[in-house]
Amino acid sequence: MALDKIESIFLSVLEDIKDYLPDLTIVGGWIPYIYSNYLWNNFVNIPVTTADIDFGVDQDIAGNYPKTIFQTLSSLNYKEKHLQMDKLFPVVLYKDKIPIEFITYPDVDITKIDNFVGRQIQINKIDKFDFLLKNRIQIDIKAKQTNKLYRVNCPKPSAFLYHKTVIFTDRLNNKKQAKDLYYMYFILRYAPNIDAIIEEISQYRTESHFKYFHENLSQYFGRISSPGCLLVEQENGPDPYILDVRKDIFDRFKNLQDKIKHA
């Protein structure tokens, strides 16, 4: 699917779900796109690496909503994919073949989530995900065609980079690992304030999972031939702006390790 079409669907979903945005956090593959186009304003002309639209949900719901997200979206042109043939629910909702996913963390109060999202929708749980929901910023997204403005919550770049570094090894296959690693490289390469981002990451030392940050970087980016460099190079593909992509990947991750180590 062409990037223009994917963007159009993404903005259409934001319009459909606009009333709920204050209590949602956009995560996943759309984050590099949002950072580049609406936070850093450097407009990197690359597609998102996945069309799936992922929303993070915490148990602390600030708004008062007369309808659940399921009730609202199911009344529009969303299709339902049933996850079990013998049960009506839970389902994943689709907008023009693009899935809309909802994510939380394992020890959440699921009743509060169900009252907001709707118990009919599949809620995925990711370890350490609450960290992203607690370290977020607001970003304004303006639709080009309609000029409508959507204020969305996204993880801080430092939190997104930190979390991906900690959890990518939990991925079950190399393809998903490669995507996570590419998101990390994207921030290291394109963020105009990378030194400030690295400084923020150094402040996460109090997090119980910080030790995995160093362990994973050492294991996957210890040498230019390490698996992390190879996976990111494969995901990035040929690059007209960089002669030696693998070396650039290695150098940027080494810079991250060195600066965190000496912070």
Image (cartoon, grey):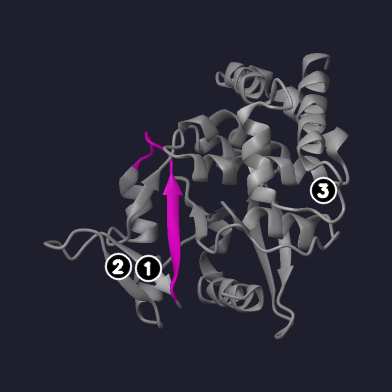
| Residue positioned 35% across, 41% down in the render | 109
User: 224 left or right of 107?
Assistant: right
Which dot marks residue 93?
A: 1
Cα distance between the residues tagged 2 and 3: 36 Å
User: In the rendered image of this protein, does residue 129 appear above or below residue 98?
Assistant: above
User: 94 left or right of 233?
Assistant: left
User: Who comes first in sequence, dot 1 or dot 3?
Assistant: 1
In front: label 1 or label 2:
2
Any part of residue 187 in sight: yes
* Closest to the observer, 158 or 179: 179
Question: Mark 3 — residue?
Answer: 190
CB atoms of marks 1 and 2 within 8 Å: yes
| Residue positioned 70% across, 59% down in the render | 34
Any part of residue 160 in sight: no
Magenta-span inclusion, residue 101: yes
User: Who comes first in sequence, dot 2 or dot 3?
Assistant: 2
User: 84 left or right of 55?
Assistant: left
Kind of residue indicated by mark 3: Tyr
User: Who comes first in sequence, dot 1 or dot 2?
Assistant: 2
